[in-house]
Image (tube, helix red, strand yellow):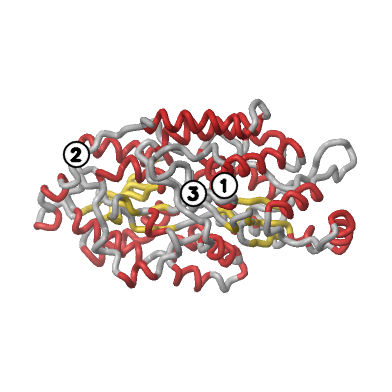
Amino acid sequence: MKLKGKLLSGVLVLCMSFSAILVGCSSNEKNPESTSSNKGQQTSEKGASGSSDKSITVLVEGGSPANTVASQTAEEFKQKTGYEVKIETVPYIGVYDKLNVEMKANSGAYDVATIDILWFPALAKNLVAMDDLMTDEVKNDFVPNVVDGGKVNGKILGMPVWTNSKILMYRTDLFNDPKEQDAFKAKYGYDLKPPTNWQQYRDVAKFFTRDTNKDGATDLYGTGILGMNNGDSVASWLDHAAQAGAKPLVVGKDNKALVNSEPYVKALEFETKILREDKSAPEGALNMASSEISEMFWNGKMAMMLEWAHFFVPSNDPGKSKVAGKVGAAPMIAGDSGVGVVPGPWYQVIPSTSKKQDIAKQYVKFIYEKNELFMKALGVAARKSVFEKYGQKPEYAHLKALETTLAASQTQNRPILPHWNEIENEALVSAIQVALSGKETPQEALNRAAAKINEIQGK
């Protein structure tokens, strides 16, 4: 999940704002050259052996929750260990690019980095395993799926710092209005409430799409569709594919594409019908990601949205939202196979080129203990104990919906594929955009995508 789109989340942020909170990115580097995973371990840790270089360098996205927490905790870590924390900040994709260049150069420039789950397939061969940090006690305090998201070939390569997924956010002032409730029941035959399945979602979205000023223009949309040319649109579509029964995601055990099979086609048909048939979402969907949709929602131009959970926090901030205090949160909607999403977690990793891996692991463990700070910075975290503590507070009412969604049977991580960036950029995004634009049917667009994926995979 691209943090910036989700935050703003900035992801987170959702993302991570997530994106942000709303919470929705990949590099052009398709096949990073791998270096020996033992290189960093073969070099002595000069800082730990008495050198005057008592520092570690931490790479983070500028302006992100990772940047905030690293800055807040740097002095405390120095007091505890004697090591200065040098923080290097770069734009979102710069984190991946910097790590990729460093792993080729083997210069030991970075000791710890905070990365998007999307980058694990390309970077995995050059990351230090953290299985020794993952005691049963640590594992048991993480929310579902987040540990596995950082696991490649049976090795845990990342310590989760936050996780996120899309949930339902809706305008309580509209849903609780007696006049709206009466009108909805008269039209659809059942009570107006936050939708729990695809049909209810379409009904509610159509019901609230209207010209409130009677001037012929649509002033209030029922929802939004993520169609921009980035990973946010792919994540949203895969959410619905999971709900329709997709499992595993994208490719089967033989690595052949599954995306033109029934669950994936149904998911894209669902989005296309909302946009083109029901006209319940803005026509400019091909230019909309999480940041654009959340901004419409905050400005009172949308009745509900399926967005990254951390977007709930700014939704209720009077300084950012015209509907502050009028926003509710509910779990993600369900398809025929139930509730399901593709989470968007972020992790701390240690490059194998680091020459200070022991102190880097101490730092990772230290930040794990500070996980609460990510909740304060973003509105989501990774540890169950943090979710439980903050979930009691009204300003974090989204956490219960997020926990329920993350624990759903159809919730699953993206596949760990070395060519994931290429698959996403060259096959999936284009298929979604072509179908949403009406140039091809969802089946036709996904047939093309499947062929492209098999070509990329050598199948």
Q: Nearer the viewer, mark 2 or mark 1?
A: 1
Position in image of residue 368 (x %, y %):
35, 64
Quadrant location of the C terminus? top left
Residue sitting at x 44%, y 42%: 251
Q: Mark 2: which amino acid?
A: Asn
The residue lying toward the viewer, choosing from 298 and 158, is 158
* Mark 1 crowdedness (10 Å alpha carbons): few <14, some 14-19, many ≥20: many
* Mark 2 crowdedness (10 Å alpha carbons): few <14, some 14-19, many ≥20: some
Residue sitting at x 81%, y 40%: 218
Q: From this viewpoint, is residue 19 visible? A: no
Q: From this viewpoint, is residue 216 visible? A: yes
For the residues bearing labels 2 and 1, Cβ distance under 8 angstroms: no
N-terminal of the two: label 1 or label 3?
3
Position in image of residue 114 (x %, y %):
36, 50
Whole-Å distance between the Cαs marked 3 and 2?
28 Å
Query: What residue does disc 3 label?
Result: 11
Q: Is residue 375 above or below residue 442?
A: below
N-terminal of the two: label 2 or label 1?
2
Whole-Å distance between the Cαs marked 2 and 1?
40 Å
Whole-Å distance between the Cαs marked 1 and 3?
21 Å
Helix, strand or loop at mark 1: helix
Position in image of residue 7 (x %, y %):
53, 49
Helix, strand or loop at mark 2: loop
